[in-house]
Amino acid sequence: MRSLLKTVVLTFLLLLASSLAVFAAIRLSGGDVTAARLPASATAADRQLFRHQMGLDQPILKQYATYLGKLFKGDLGNSLTNSAKISTLAVEKIKNSLILGATSMLLVFGIGIPLGMIAALKRNSWFDTGITSASVAGMAVPNFWLALIAIYFFSTRLGWLPSAGQGGIKYLVLPAFVLSAEGIALTVRMTRSAMLDNLNQDFVRTLRAAGLSERRIYFKHVLRNSLLPIISLAGLRVGQIVGYALVVETIFGWPGVGQSLVNAVLRRDYPVVQFFSLLLVLVVTLGNLAASIGYTLANPKLRK
Amino acid sequence: MSRFRRALKNKQLVIGMIIAIVIVVLGIVGPAVFGDYSKQDLLRGHKPVGTPGDFFGTDALGRSLAARATYGIRISLFVAISVTGLAMVVGTIIGLIAGYVKGLVDGVISLLIDFIWGFPLILVAVLAAASIGSGLLPVILAVGLVNTVAIARVVRGEVLGISEKDFVVAAKAGGYSTMRILTKHVAPNVIPVALVLSSYYVAVAIIAEAALSFVGLGAQAPLPSLGQMVSEGRNYMRLNHWESTIPGVIIFAMVLSVSLIGDGLRDLLDPRLRTALERARAK
Amino acid sequence: MTDEPLLDIRDLSIGLRGDGVGYDIVRNVSMSLYPKEILAIVGESGCGKSLTALSVLALHASPPLHITSGSIMYDGRDLTKVSASQMRAVRGAEIAMVFQDPMSALDPMFTAGTLLTSAVQAHHKVRYDVAKSRALEALADAGIEDPRRRFGEYPFQLSGGVSQRVMIALALINDPKVIIADEPTTALDVTVQAQILDRLKELRAERGMSIILITHNLGVVASVADRMVVMYTGEVVESGMVEEVLATPQHPYTKGLLGAVPRLNSDAATLVPIMGRVPQPNELPPGCSLPIVAAESSMSAGPIARILRYMVTP
């Protein structure tokens, strides 16, 4: 428990430091902001004045403090491209990304763990071989290409599902599956190898000798032991989903944070880039923190 | 059985190597054979594979798909292999130092390593592009940082285990210098792990470069990147699917070959090292 | 000893099968366990004693190991032929096992209490509080000082000795007729060893249980067991009452074993090692264990150990 507290404190310090680094990196390339806002005919003095008005000539730490202060008041500034308030924009984008991200996480574990368990239970069967090879291939297909293939077959050819946009659950199916594909493949692999590993542990023999049923040994004891490494790496899955969402949302025209960030970078819309970058750094950090808390709570050795 | 003959018996390794050799040869000789990747001919656009005169097909601007794809292989391999190679060297050194020296140095290094390790490569690359602008440079920086950290992390863990072993303790007791212990006794035991791991990280780097170029933040026109070709071709899936299929299949084959090589090498490794690998591969 | 045997192993052979290999690791082993007796199986690592014991409850790794012939009679049934669910009903309730390394033999994710109550509920449809009170009793029976506290503790919180007592509680909890203890004290301190063995002896007296004790320690055999079986390279080479076997060993291997036991009344220099190593099953010439017999007949004088010098020739 004590080590957990230490982890939380250190994580927040690192979060502060890394967000400052991201903030500074984006701010220090501020030449682009002035270039984007001012006409090409602006003089050096005009630029200097603009930088002063925007507070860009102040020390970076002070700028960051000012930014955080505004952030907590809900003032995120305006987009450069359409002058919309970022705070209004952000709520909708975050909601959309949460729907897509949560569905994908659910698919990663909801499909990956059971498939890995069955593969381990029926090891060396055709099912196991199929699942194992599919997961090797699943990790080699880049997901943007998987997305194109899925769109080609399920939208263009078969016309079952929409290729892009947002609406009912139909619109969620393709992006969610593409986003979770690699995570599913990894989870299957990990679950399978952890289950096989634990099935060979001495404690399984003890439980058998005590007369427990195979089902109970498998689903209660072996599974509980195997879930530990999977929980400890769940934070990485969050990060992975966030990373791939940048690409997948763009392909499927899913109006979320990932698509907005990529578009904002392409358009050099710095206030938007600034906010969404910090947001994703926060999400990934919290995801990893949640996983390490979960691991501590699930592991009797660390919990006590 | 000699190590080489054992390697030849390993199917994954052999298949992976064959694919890899084909791709590397394509990347080296392709641009010379298929001509200028930027030569446009708007009258000969969207030609499918097998068209007389444009046997390997053309894109919307009538540029040779083969010339562009083989040049794209060069870019991809440069970013993935040279940068990951450098990351392996730097990461191994950092990991050796952190794991062996321990104490405050290790505390700080491992804290940073664990933190950065939690971030996906693609996000880091996008953040880099957000800071310094689109192009191959942010991709190279991101691949370098993330892969260095990933390798340092595993090497550190291995070193922590090894430095408790009797042969290291004996070397210390024998009065050998730290440098000598690290290079002669510890490093030989962790370098195989770092090597195998690097092959997996090459795969991650290939995907990241392609994905960044796909969304427009990586290689910029007129440089032909495979990811960018897939992206340009996706609007013409019905008209001429080759424009995205050729680069797509090449990316798939590259990633698959590196993964197969990694799996094959892992099987040749000491079984004790395999668990460390499985864990490190969880990304 | 006039009773019928409780457990009767007849001509049991266990083989390794698969991928182009096929040879028997345990060959034609026979032994009987009578009510209320402690039977010791003695032999060095790899002689097949643990495998024989595991096969009684079908706990050997199968595949690649298979019972190739013979029978294990218990309560009128041949345990090598019963169904999986019938075997499950025997495990823990009729015949229980205690394993060698208590630290790895207990599931690290569950408390001792959960393990014990699960074992009760595997055989009896009882409420949790009933199972719990039985678990507490079993912990006390196994000689644990503070059952309530241990009930809620995880394996990593228990010392080796306490873990082994939890294992014994797990074996006792469903009141079996037979307990098979596979090197139950090897991983423990000497003082704890003695306590555990005493507890096993008391349990036999209190509950009338029969115990099979697997060990390579002749001191343990002499102080605890009634009868003993000596195994070597997968075969039974000698068996009988403990006093008789120890006083007048017939088989050269048993003599060798006795020569390797330290004695307080002799100095260490006379401690005679058994030379060579145990041959692998696939290295045995046809006719088994013959090299030893042959060596013995060619010997006239000299230390016993010389007879046993067994060099495996490729």
Image: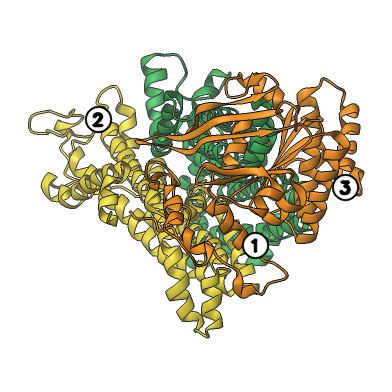
Q: Is residue A22 visible?
A: no
Of helix, strand and loop, which one carries label 3? Answer: loop
Task: Choose top left, top right, bottom left or bottom right for residue C34.
Answer: top right
For the residue pair A199 and C201, the one nearer the viewer reads as C201
In the picture, the quarter occupied by the N terminus of chain B is bottom left
Residue located at (40% from left, 60% from top): B192
Which residue, given by chain and number where applicable, does mark 2 sit on? B242
For the residue pair A261 and A17, the one nearer the viewer reads as A17
Mark 2 and mark 3: Cα distance apart in space = 74 Å
Q: Label 3 sits on what residue type? A: Ile
* Colour for chain C in the figure: orange
Mark 1 and mark 3: Cα distance apart in space = 32 Å
Residue located at (48% from left, 58% from top): C308
Question: Residue C4, percent across and down?
Answer: 72, 25
* Colour for chain B in the figure: yellow
Taking the image as shown, residue B132 lies to the left or right of residue C209, namely left
Q: Label 2 sits on what residue type? A: Trp
Residue lying at the far front of the rendered structure = C300
- Tag in front: 2 or 1: 1
* Colour for chain A in the figure: green
Which residue, given by chain and number where applicable, does mark 3 sit on? C144
Mark 2 and mark 1: Cα distance apart in space = 80 Å
